[in-house]
Image (cartoon, rainbow, N blue to C red):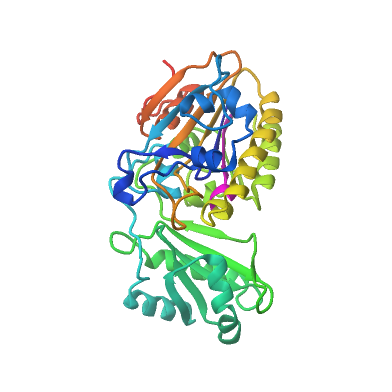
Amino acid sequence: MRAICIVVDSAGIGAMPDAAQYGDEGSATIPNIAKVSGGLNVPTMAKLGLGNITPIVGVPPAKQPLGSFGKMHELSPGKDTTTGHWEMMGAKLDFAFPVFPKGFPKSFIETFEKAVGRGTIGNYPASGTEIIMQLGDEHVKTGKLIVYTSADSVFQIAAHEEVVPLEELYSICRKARELLQPPDLGAARVIARPFIGTSGAYKRTAHRHDFSLEPSVDTLLDVLKKQGVTTYGIGKIYDIFAGRGVDPYVTTESNADGMKKTMESLDKVKDGLIFVNLVDTDMIFGHRRDVAGYKKALEEFDAWLAGFMAKLGEKDLLILTSDHGCDPTFKGSDHTREYPFLLAYQKGRPGADLGIRQGLWDIAASIAKHLGRRYDRGTQFWS
């Protein structure tokens, strides 16, 4: 008995009713990509019912969808990875993680520099690829850490791997995590952003590592692990939950790597939860407003999905979803406040309209039910 939950990071299906409060009215990641690019070619997800959720150019509604379909109203405020994944596993937030549009307070930066024994440069919102081009030479020359943030609740630390060895960078991030605590400085994530290369040609590596706050309540992952159920994390799942409730886990270098490891997980996990995050749609294409790249990533995932579904058994539950939006057709470079899409599939179970779910935690409730476990938050899809 397995449940496989795959999060296509940032693949929102349309603006939520409160999107205007976030400046995101009119955002709709998947529909807008399809609209401006002449249509999406995602026949596998179309058969599951993706086009039944909302009109999408190139994705006709299925007359007899193989899967159940809907979208989810996020109850927590915010529009970030941590908030979305936590609520998905049952930890609804009553507050939004703080953001730092003017950088982090001088008092914190001074305390941080003293704690880690290195100076800093930057400390403003920036694109990660751009800031290493702008400040990379100074960093290499001085050894000062490049620190920056974004529209998300993050404190990011970039360093050249030949200037600051990986283990030192990770240690520095752990110290930052200790210092950045709620309420005022409780950034959701501290992120190590190592890079390599020479002046004018700096390039980030796959050695990124996230150091998250821990959920304040037991998530479904905690409950399953305590009961001896396998909770296999793929991608940044381990990092998002600060390791809690995730055992074992593997990291990924790309969506292609993530899909390969997800396929391999079927041979490794015969019972339990396989929880996957595919991040390229967000990190590489959404934030950079790359419509063509995002479209290609969705279509590549869909092509892979057909082969993956063929390997599933009658006792396997497959859930496809997202954690927020990041509309590449939209202004700026930030996440967008959108409904995550929801597709649920089990061989032999007829498809159904799941409507608008009140909370992403319905996924946790449905996984718990499928695995024969009890979890008190959320409402399962099927009675």
| Whether residue 14 is situated above or below residue 209 in the rendered picture | above
| Whether residue 98 is situated above or below residue 263 in the rendered picture | below
x 59%, y 31%: residue:
58
Q: Does the segment drawn in magenta span residue 296?
A: no
In the rendered structure, the answer to whether residue 176 lies left or right of residue 312 reads left
Which image quadrant is residue 47 in?
A: top right
Outermost residue toward the bottom in this view: 141
- Image coordinates of residue 307 in percent, x first then y, are 71, 29
x 58%, y 54%: residue:
284
Main secondary structure along the magenta-highlighted residues: strand
Residue 17 visible: yes
Q: Please count the marks in the image.
A: 0
Which image quadrant is residue 178 in?
A: bottom left
| Whether residue 202 is situated above or below residue 138 in the rendered picture | above
- Image coordinates of residue 119 in percent, x first then y, are 47, 82
Q: Quadrant of the C terminus?
A: top left
In the rendered structure, the answer to whether residue 69 lies left or right of residue 21 reads right
Q: Does the segment drawn in magenta span residue 278?
A: yes
Span of residues in magenta: 272-282
x 53%, y 54%: residue:
289
Residue 235 visible: no
- Image coordinates of residue 84 in percent, x first then y, are 42, 43
- Image coordinates of residue 138 in percent, x first then y, are 56, 84
| Whether residue 153 is situated above or below residue 52 in the rendered picture | below
Q: Quadrant of the N terminus?
A: top right
Q: Nearer the viewer, residue 11 or 189?
A: 11
Q: Nearer the viewer, residue 363 or 171?
A: 363
Q: Nearer the viewer, residue 352 or 1?
A: 352
x 66%, y 26%: residue:
309
